[in-house]
Image: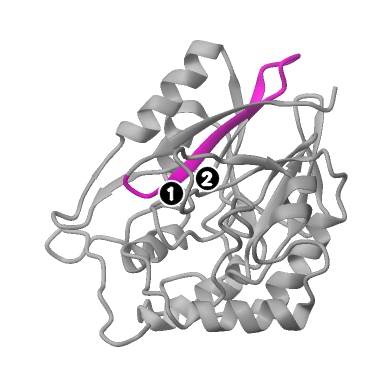
Amino acid sequence: MNTPTVQGFFDDATNTISYVVWDPTTNKAAVIDSLLDFDQASGRTTTESADRLIAFVKEQGLEVEWIVDTHVHADHLTAAPYIRSQLGGRTGIGEHISTVQKVFGKIFNEGQAFHTDGSQFDHLFKDGETYRIGTIEAKAIHTPGHTPACMSHLIGDALFVGDTIFMPDFGTARCDFPGGDAGTLYDSIQKLFALPDETRVFLCHDYKAPGRDEFVWETTIGQEKAENIHVKTGTTREQFVKMRTERDATLAMPKLILPSVQINMRAGEMPPPEANGQRYMKLPINAL
């Protein structure tokens, strides 16, 4: 058995897709890129999106073994701690999270109390590491470029790519965040393009490219190689770097990047309370 069952959950506010992926022979499961609802105007968090995912897991009789974030998201808050409290499982992210923590720890002036070794997560995946979800073998593939810590996860024939690539008609991830690099992203995508063409590809976001009426978040490696508007077969590294660099220069920062990174680099935990018992997020001025 190498074909897991996959259920996606689309969030309208952030265009994020979270996933439950499971082995149908054992009902062992993983949650990929969970989402905590956050209202920036009020600073209030809610768990409606996570609760829908949790209800689905319980209805299907699944047992969660892993709660994986493909990277430190800059556009939504992870619900990993809440999911773990409700369903169990181990949280995981790529081992290069430490690079992201060191960079943003300085930006947010976190001080020595903030650990930059990834110890906030239960497990740090290494490039090429294999693990299992029930009887299905999974593999972590380091795919930096969007961020230094991006990790794609190949679970059976299903590949979860985070923000590395989007639907073929929308292209690829931006590379202008601290630690991002367009040439590195090109190299990462070539690693994914070496997988079988029939490999199913599940995306973390869809923004409904112009001319398309519906949101879509599943494609294949073959379709990406043939049709991706930024990096299909035949696109050179130089062409991609030029396109990506010029395009990124026109993009505004994601609306939730500052709250998202502060929370996600902590594995979804909120900053520690201050003397009055209240927790706060920082808003660094002119830092990005």
Q: Residues within 10 Å of mark 2 (few under 14, many from 20)?
A: many
Image quarter of residue 22? top right
Residue ID for mark 2: 33
258 is within the stretch colored magenta: no
Residue at (69, 76) in percent of width and height: 240
Residue ID for mark 1: 78
Inter-mark Cα distance, 1 to 2? 7 Å
Which amino acid type corresponds to the residue marked 2 in the rendered image? Asp
Q: Nearer the viewer, residue 149 or 16?
A: 16
Instruction: Tell me the quadrant of the picture where the C terminus can be found.
Output: bottom left
Residue 2: x percent and y percent?
A: 83, 28
Secondary element at tag 2 = loop
Residue 243: x percent and y percent?
A: 61, 79
Between discs 1 and 2, the one toward the N terminus: 2
Instruction: Tell me the quadrant of the picture where the N terminus can be found.
Output: top right
Q: Nearer the viewer, residue 101 or 236?
A: 236
Magenta stretch, residue numbers: 13-29
Decide if residue 98 is in sight here.
yes
Secondary element at tag 1 = loop
Residue at (63, 60) in percent of width and height: 164
Residue 121: x percent and y percent?
A: 56, 53
Q: Are marks 1 and 2 in contact (CB under 8 Å)?
A: yes
Please tell me whether residue 248 is drawn above or below residue 65 in the rendered image: below
Task: Judge from the rendering whether residue 8 lies leftward or rightward of residue 22; answer left or right.
Answer: left
Decide if residue 80 is in sight here.
no
